[in-house]
Image (tube, helix red, strand yellow):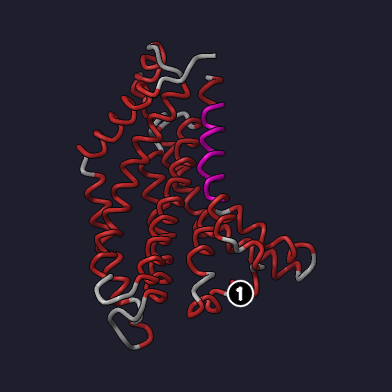
Amino acid sequence: MHRIEPGQIANIAVKEFRDRIRSRWVLAAAVIFTLFALVIAYFGSAQAGTVGFRGMDITIASLVSLVIYLVPLISLILGYDAIVGERERGSLDLLLTMPITRLELLFGKYLGLGMALTISTVAGFGIAGIILSYGIGFPALLQYSVFMITTLLMGLSFLSLALLLSAYCTSRVSASGAAIALWFFFVLVYDLVLIGILVAAGDGIVGRIFPLLLYLNPTDIFRIINIYNLDEVRNLYGLATVLPQTLASNWKLCLALLFWIITPLAIAYKRLRDM
């Protein structure tokens, strides 16, 4: 078995990261995250007839709704052509003739893209957090830190899914279409179908396994982590009655997000190995 060379992985990761820096993708994403976070924090309570910062619970609840739409889309766009793009340009075969394994290629690309996503997420939401932190206590900052970390984990899980699509699709056009379809499924369609099945089937076996089905969607996992422990907004989402305490454990939910990061990468590697 070929020994993994960290240097090869690092070289590919640095190249991917530099490409995103040169394209100003990191700066653009960070600015978008900062602006949206500040706007949501200030105007998130406009429907209630007030504006301004009303507390971290309300702010995080509003940001969760934004992040679930924005971060998966950005992650999928970031990685959908990572492999299929190389194949279309004819550079994938050239790369594989060099002393580099498919595993090193996949890890290098994922790490480089992951660094770009990490910097844009931490910088964007971090700047907003610093601005919002004026006059609030440590517990509120801790809540916001958990929100940032889990936002990044969700983004990395969709980046893994993007590389999986890129490994299986035959063209950039098909990969971009599959990425948009995947975004629609996880962000818009999955919960609607799940609720429809629950309403139609009643409280039988479907009702009992419903909490487990939430684990099959990384956006639901992210939402539960950030909403379940916020007493002020938890009941508005219905999570207090849907999810039992045993499944609402943060460490279990974070492990589930790690599963969503590792599994698509493993499947993508299998595809690359069989090419």
| Magenta region | 256-270
Q: At which x and y percent is residue 7?
A: 35, 22
Does the magenta portion include 90?
no
Would residue 200 appear left or right of 266 to someone viewing this image? Answer: right
* Secondary structure state at the residue bearing disc 1: helix
Placement of 72 over or under 165, stated as above or below: below
The residue indicated by pointer 1 is 240
Q: Image check: 173 left or right of 270?
A: left
What kind of residue is marked 1? Ala
From the top left corner, tell me how far across and down residue 233 is, in percent.
Answer: 49, 77
Is 167 displayed left or right of 204 in the figure? left
Find residue 202 and report its image quarter.
Answer: bottom right
Magenta span includes 269: yes
Q: Position of residue 41 (x, y in %)?
A: 31, 73
Residue at 29% over, 47% down: 119
Quadrant containing the N terminus in the rendered view: top right
Q: Residue furthest bottom?
A: 49
